[in-house]
Image (spheres, helix red, strand yellow):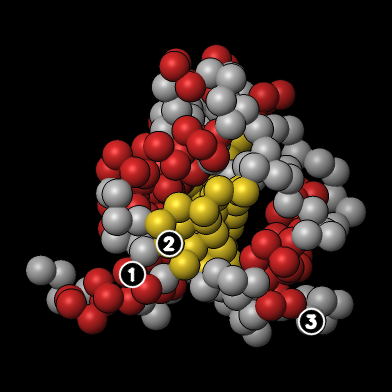
Amino acid sequence: MLAELGDAGQQKLLGARVLVVGAGGLGSALIPYLAAAGVGTLGIIDPDRVELSNLARQVIHESGDIGRLKVESARDRVEELNPDVRVITHAEALTAENAERMLRDYDVVADGCDNFATRFVVNDACVALGIPLVSAAIAGWQGQVMSVLPGGPSYRDLVHPDAPEANTCRESGVIGPLAGIIGSMQALEVLRVILGKPALAGKVAIYNGITGQQRLVTLSPSPSFG
C-alpha cells in the first residue's frame, strides 16, 4: 500500500541479505522489524549469552533464555514472527581477522555493538568490501544512527581511532526504551538503504531521550582515510 514501496520494493526486501552485528538492545528492535518487513535473509553475529541484567532493554530475549546464546534466542523469535526469513547465526566475536570473511556475502550490514573497537572493525571491513553500513549506538539517555555508503564519509570521520573507549551500557547504564527507539530508527534506515532511499548517508541522527529532541550532524570525509 505504500507508494514508496510497492511490489517491486517488497521483492527487493525479500532478496536482501542483511547482517546484524549484535543481538542486544539495539538488535532487539532491529531484528524483529527487519524480519516483519520481509527481509529475506538475516545474519546475526553475537558471541554472548543471555543474562538477567540484559532483559530490561534486550526484549527479544525472555527469562527462559537466560544462559542461552543470544543468536539462538534471537533466531527463535524471528522464526516465531516470520518463518519465511532465513536466519544465519554466527556465535563468535567479530575481529579484524574474520570480518571480511563474515561480511562479504551480505548486501547491508547493521552494526549495533557496544564498543569502539568492534565498530571500527565493522566500518573498515564495509569500506573495503563496498558494503553499505548502518551504524547505531546508545548510552545513558542518548543514541545515534548513521549510514556509511561506498565512497562517502565513514565511522572514522565521526570518531577518531585514538578516542578513549566510551562506557558501555553495563558500565554507565541505559534507559531501556531508548534501545527500542534507536533500534527502530536503525531498522528504518536499513530498509531505506535496501530500497535505494537512504536518509542518513554522511549524516548522524542524534536523539536525546531526556528532551525528546533530535538533531542531524553532517560529516565530511577525512583525507586520512580512503
Mark 2–mark 3 Cα distance, whole angstroms, equals: 30 Å
Above/below status of 211 relative to 194: above
Q: Which amino acid type corresponds to the residue marked 3 in the rendered image?
A: Gly
Res 106 quadrant in image: bottom right
Label 1 with label 3: CB-CB less than 8 Å: no
Residue count near mark 2 (Cα–Cα under 10 Å), binned few <14, some 14–19, many ≥20: many
Q: Residue furthest right?
A: 162
- Please tell me which residue lies in front, 152 or 101: 101
Kindly report which numbered mark, 1 or 3, lies closer to the viewer in this rendering: 1
Please give left or right for residue 165 compared with residue 32 in the image: right
- Within 10 Å of disc 1 (Cα), the crowding (few <14, some 14-19, many 20+) is many
Residue 13 shows which numbered tag?
1
- Give above or below for 201 relative to 38: below
Q: Callout 2: helix, strand or loop?
A: strand
Between circles 2 and 3, the one closer to the viewer is: 2
Q: Which mark is residue 4?
A: none
**Local crowd at mark 3 within 10 Å, few (<14), some, or many (≥20)?**
few
Which residue is painted at 43% across and 48% down in the image?
30
The residue singled out by tag 2 in the image is 41
> Horizontal placement of 17 versus 7: left or right?
right
Residue 149 quadrant: bottom right
Residue at the spot of label 3: 226
Q: Amino acid at mark 1?
A: Leu
* Circle 3: element type: loop
